[in-house]
């Protein structure tokens, strides 16, 4: 891991930019989906938001939870717990001069697994669809972390 | 996006350091505000914490939820969902040789929008104050993501 | 902060890679611990998951919450709220040419504090074990943020 090529010549880093931007944008879509269900199903967490659905005392009944909204929120939190570590580890990994082809397949597998994970969570598809796609994404990140720690530890 | 200038000559990257450090520090303040309300209102999530408010059986009644605490926690989670993606996308964007002035206005708009978002959430201000500030921050991050993907895709 | 050494010659950055990879891997272990308790205690959040514990109507009773699972989830969320900001701020800090020894001691203290925090949360140990370890990690991140903003602000 001694060699860090210049960023502009680093094909792995350029690929990482594209893949991580796609998967983080996907994660951000979860906010839109949550907002969509909150508004169409009139399910709010804050009194000032519930005023969009009813005035005064009437608004209070829209301060509630809804299984559809909670499902999107769980999917969003799962994205945060998995996509952000992928970004952190993947950034360091892509700067540590890995084999280009190996690295790009790591990124591809992760992005595909997480897109499928969202579909499996929101549809919902029966297990083990979601479980397996979670496991693949998790394995990709651990594989990059393992390589970072194996090559050379600076402690 | 072919050119990555040296980091020390990269004015955009230096500006990104300042703005992102400010907005992440702001996010971290949410932990302090949560702790403040938990302690002053005696609202705890863990039995070992509730012992600060009462001994033995008496402690159990402080294992409760409180609208004030929950509001700060929602604001904190919203920060995680929005400020972390801004950091990830903004870091890559600031390394991809964008126009300096365009980039800095992206950062300024985002930081101002998120500070106002926290004020609007915690006061709380009536809608659409919070909704609009959320939308501005979201739009800034998407605008940077769009530019990263438009310029050149490496897949 | 004017000088950014080359990444491959940057001992601080190399140390940051090792420490941050370790502490992010630790954070990811929380997912495994959550899954372990969900499966062994038969506590599920999604109907399609609960089918692993019982068929048809019988599955519904496993859609429940459990204090053991909730505790791990709180610890995981606390990790997200603290370890991700450490990564973001620490990355920028390690690129800003800090004193090597000071930087490495920041990283060491943070990683040790967060590992102890997880032990204190999951055991659970009596307070102030968890509170103090949280505070140390928080202080380390703020100390790096302070240095980034003090040296030179580019606004």
Image: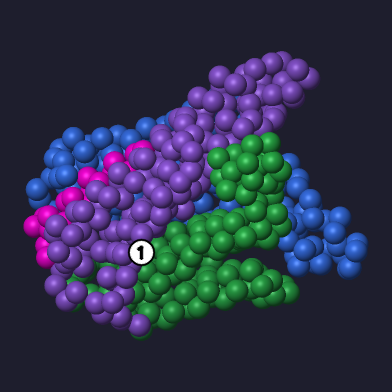
Chain colours: A purple, B blue, C green
Residue A62, percent from left and from top: 69, 24
Look at the image and say whether residue A3 sits in the magenta stretch. no
Viewer-proximal residue, A146 or B20?
Answer: A146
* Whether residue C12 is visible: no
Residue A58, percent from left and from top: 75, 17
For residue A57, what is the image quadrant?
Answer: top right
**Point 42% across, 65% down: residue:** C24
Residue C3, percent from left and from top: 21, 69
Look at the image and say whether residue A15 sits in the magenta stretch. yes
**Point 69% across, 41% down: residue:** C58
Name the magenta segment's main secondary structure. Answer: helix
Q: Is residue C41 above or below residue C21?
A: above
* Whether residue B38 is visible: yes
Q: Is residue B86 left or right of residue A71?
A: left
Viewer-proximal residue, B56 or B29?
Answer: B56
Tell how many labels. Answer: 1
Residue annotated with mark 1: A142
Q: Is residue C49 above or below residue C42?
A: above
Q: Which quadrant does the N terminus of chain A fall into?
A: bottom left
**Point 25% across, 64% down: residue:** A93
For residue A154, what is the image quadrant?
Answer: bottom left
Viewer-proximal residue, A52 or B109?
Answer: A52
Q: Is residue C134 above or below residue C59?
A: below
Would you call the spot at circle 1 few (<14 residues within 10 Å), some (14-19), or many (20 or more)? many
**Point 39% across, 48% down: residue:** A133
Q: Which quadrant does the C terminus of chain A fall into?
A: bottom left
* Element type at mark 1: helix
Residues in magenta?
A: A5-28
For residue C125, what is the image quadrant?
Answer: bottom right
Q: Is residue A114 left or right of residue A46?
A: left
């Amino acid at each position: 891991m001694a060699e860090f090529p210049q960023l502009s010549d680093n094909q792995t880093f350029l690929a990482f930019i594209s893949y991580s931007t796609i998967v983080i944008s996907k994660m951000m879509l979860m906010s839109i989906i949550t907002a969509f269900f909150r508004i169409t199903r009139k399910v709010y967490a804050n009194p000032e938001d519930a005023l969009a659905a009813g005035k005064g005392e009437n608004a209070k009944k829209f301060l509630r939870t809804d299984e559809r909204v909670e499902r999107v929120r769980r999917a969003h939190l799962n994205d945060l717990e998995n996509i952000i570590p992928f970004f952190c580890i993947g950034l360091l990994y892509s700067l540590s001069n890995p084999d280009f082809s190996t690295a790009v397949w790591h990124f591809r597998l992760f992005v595909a697994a997480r897109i499928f994970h969202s579909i499996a969570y929101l549809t919902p598809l029966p297990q083990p669809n979601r479980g397996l796609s979670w496991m693949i994404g998790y394995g990709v990140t651990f594989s990059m972390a393992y390589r970072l720690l194996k090559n050379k530890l600076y402690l």
